[in-house]
Image: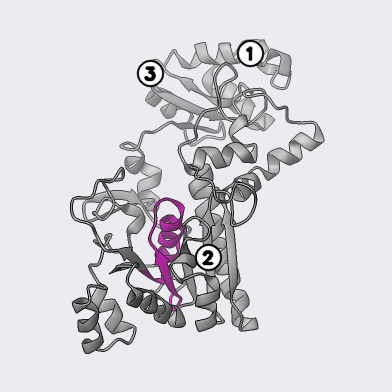
Amino acid sequence: MPGPLHGIKIIEMVGIGPCPFAAMMLADMGAEVIRIDRKPVPGAATPFPSLGTRYDVMARGRRSLALDLKHPEAKEVVLALSEQADILLEGFRPGVMERLGLGPDACLARNPKLVYGRITGWGQTGPLSQAAGHDLNYIALSGMLHAMGRADSPPAPPLNLVGDFGGGAMMLAFGVVCAALEARSSGRGQVVDAAMTDGSALLGAMMYGLRAHGSWVDARAANMLDGGAPFYDTYACRDGKYLSVGAIEPQFYAQLLDLAGATDPEFLKQWSQKRWPELKAKFAALFATRTRDEWCALLEGSDACVAPVLDMAEAPQHPHNRARGAFVDIDGVTQPAPAPRFSRTAPEVAAAPATPGQHSAEILADWGWSQDAIAQLKTAQVI
């Protein structure tokens, strides 16, 4: 069964980080996504050695057309492709696509219905828009990084999940699908400006609301959801592995105490915030008495809200993940499966990542180029 975005045609100007992730999400849902790769430079060093290989998971599910974007004819190829596309995605610094002659004005002139999705850290406008940066910088500006980590440590980098992927790629994917739906009724495309600073701040909507209410303080590990509460944290077990505990609601907390054998009456003072440090020490001592798997045998699957902290080797093997098919194997690489799930238009398993330029001639033929025109592009070393 084709996925829910079957029939949507997308051009992805290949970069790193959030733009490929957004394109992967859209391809996972059945959209036809054409990756515009830059022509490979033999022997060029890269800090990202998985790119262009089967381990480049974010490149799955789409074909690759490699172009020499410095060649004038390459610009015409992209513009001609954009005439047939519903969406174009790019993740370069503001102004780069304009200098290539492929900015929104040029593309929308050729296809007024095109949705032009742009993803950057700081956004297309603002005093920082031309500055370099990475995920950590963007979430720092949003107020979210300050809230993460232990009280006695600097803010902890949460991988690049919050800025690049949550606040960036997912907002871009959401934005271009929204704009594509609107274009169906209006007949007009538009530019979607997805900034990781904006998206990261939006992910913190609940925390900003709690702070305004006076229920959140600007200190790490001092709030209910940041590791400050004894009933919402991770604990080391006897074998050095960890258990996550999230028993917030009183009935869930009561079940945790019952099943764990926590009989000390001090545990009943769940919402006495001044006693939280003492209760955390008691929980730490309790959980250190058994191995992680022993605790899971006792608590997992109950309403005590407990789950093991799994590493990336363990997660695909967990019975719940296996039952849901949360991970798939593509060309020998175990990776997260497409999400979310659909009852009727479940997308097919994604194809393995393409090497740059693997489908250049095939894509152009499918999108209307003649064999003579393709041969001329090869001769001119455009593709």
- Whether residue 2 is visible to the viewer of this picture, yes or no, is yes
Q: Is residue 25 left or right of residue 72?
A: right
Quadrant in the picture for the C terminus = bottom left
Q: Secondary structure at mark 3?
A: loop
Residue that numbered label 2 is attached to: 117
Q: CA distance from mark 3 to mark 1?
A: 21 Å
Of the pair 337 and 237, the residue shown nearer to us: 337
Q: Callout 2: helix, strand or loop?
A: strand
Give the image location of residue 110, x and y in percent: 50, 83
Q: Earlier in the sequence, mark 1 or mark 2?
A: 2
Q: Which quadrant of the figure contains the N terminus?
A: bottom left
Residue extending farthest right = 213
Q: Is residue 82 depicted above or below 171 in this figure?
A: below
Real-space CA distance between mark 1 and mark 2, rounded to the nearest whole angstrom? 47 Å
Q: Residue 263, how many percent across, how many down?
A: 60, 13
Residue beneath disc 1: 277
- How far apart in space, not on screen, are marks 3 and 2 (Cα)? 45 Å
How many numbered dots are placed on residues in this image? 3
Q: What's the colour scheme?
A: one colour
Badge 3 or badge 2: first in the primary sequence: 2
Which residue, given by chain and number where applicable, does mark 3 sit on? 240
* Residue at the (46%, 53%) spot, across then down: 18
Residue 111 visible from this viewpoint = no
| Classed neighbour count for the residue bearing mark 3: other residues with Cα under 10 Å, few (<14), some (14–19), many (≥20) | few
- Residue 182 quadrant: bottom right
Indicate which label's residue lies in the foreground, 3 or 2: 2
Residue type marked 1: Pro
Tell me the SS state at disc 1.
Answer: helix
Residue 217 location (% of width, % of height): 73, 27
The range drawn in magenta is 6-34
Q: Badge 2: few (under 14), some or many (20 or more) residues near its Cα, within 10 Å?
A: many
Tell us which disc is closer to us: 1 or 2. 2
